[in-house]
Amino acid sequence: MKRPAQLILTITDQCNHGCRMCYYHSSLNRRTKVMTLEEYQKLSDELDELELLLISGGEPFLRQDIAEVIQIFYRSNQTRSVFIPTNGSTPDRIISTVSQMLDLMPELQLTLMMSLEGLHEEHDAIHEQKDAFNSVVETTRRLTLLRAHRQSQGKQGFSVLLNSVVSNENADRIIPLMEYAKEHLYVDTHTFTPMRGEGPTPDCRAPTPAQFESLQKQAQPYFQHYLAKEPAALKHILDRYGLWMGLLRGEGLPFQCQAGHYIGVIEPDAKVRLCELTPVIGDLRASEFNFERVWNSDEANELRQQLIGCSCTHACFINASQRYYSLQDQ
Ligand code: SF4
Ligand code: SF4
């Protein structure tokens, strides 16, 4: 079994929001003994080249040494593409950390994805955090200004995306949100994804196929707004919505998910999973950071067998699987 080419690195379980759609809610703020920089270096030494790191949390920017964590993989595994989702709650820290990362790693292709689920009080209510909307708007504006400033100096830029997680509770409020973002926030694109897993309350659920289909139809002008000059990216997004609608209707994935093959997950406490929605397969600390032993254990291989034909809407794993199959076609 080859080592993964992409990793989801959940670097902290700390989060200052309490989102109604958070599938990770039961693992948050547990005072976990998170992996140290030395431990990340040991993990990195065990891996081959990593084409993509998906940094996750909790809220990733609550970890002070996020830049140093990424730098380990940048140096040792030639990782150049890094994706960080954030709730945008700490504008000063995010701006200074992003500047630091780009200065430390001049070839870094960084993508920041801001989480925006509603307008004003609606977003605050969904995130259960006062002023959350104002913070994410401020962070987004300052990031786009930072990018413009860096590019005016001939330095590398970075991508700023917005994503809105859609549940049964905000499905009919996404289009006004997209309109606001188009007029007021100068991001590269604004997408929305169906809520996955289960949140802290059963009242908040994934949207129905009809809700998601209606939303996807109404969102076409916004996709055109952002991506009209990038036909391949536009086609990719439209195909993705087609895939999600099929999944919400109960149709399976049209390919075998590559979780546990092309992509894997490292939890903040050094536990390893094949994907974020399946059980832990082993503990790097207990295995003296022998990644191979954990990744190829009998338990891991048994779970891989059980996941044949598995389906879900998780974008990271769909992206990784599509990347894997595109490489096979070359
Ligand atoms: S969805 Fe993200 S921001 Fe919201 S509670 Fe979960 S980890 Fe925190
Ligand atoms: S389809 Fe989803 S739940 Fe199944 S293995 Fe892939 S990521 Fe995990």
Image (tube, rainbow, N blue to C red):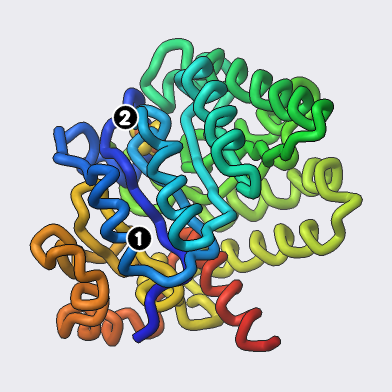
Say if 15 sits above or below 223 in the image: above
* Image coordinates for residue 316, horizontal then vertical, percent: 50, 59
* Image coordinates for residue 208, horizontal then vertical, percent: 51, 53
Residue placed under numbered mark 1 in the picture: 44
Residue 110 appears in the picture as rendered: yes
- Image quadrant assignment for residue 81: bottom right
Secondary structure at badge 1 equals: helix
Say if 123 sits above or below 165 in the image: above
Q: Residue furthest right?
A: 229
| Mark 2: few/some/many CA within 10 Å (<14, 14-19, 20+) | some
| Left or right of residue 276, residue 130 in this image | right
Say if 224 sits above or below 287 in the image: above
* Image coordinates for residue 180, horizontal then vertical, percent: 72, 24
For the image shown, how many numbered marks are present on the structure?
Answer: 2
The image quadrant where one finds the C terminus is: bottom right
Residue placed most toward the observer, 173 or 90: 90
The structure residue drawn at horizontal position 25% and vertical position 76%, both measured from the top left corner, is: 292
Residue placed under numbered mark 2 in the picture: 15
Residue placed most toward the observer, 183 or 38: 38
The image quadrant where one finds the N terminus is: bottom left
| Left or right of residue 187, residue 21 in this image | left
Q: CA distance from mark 1 to mark 2?
A: 25 Å
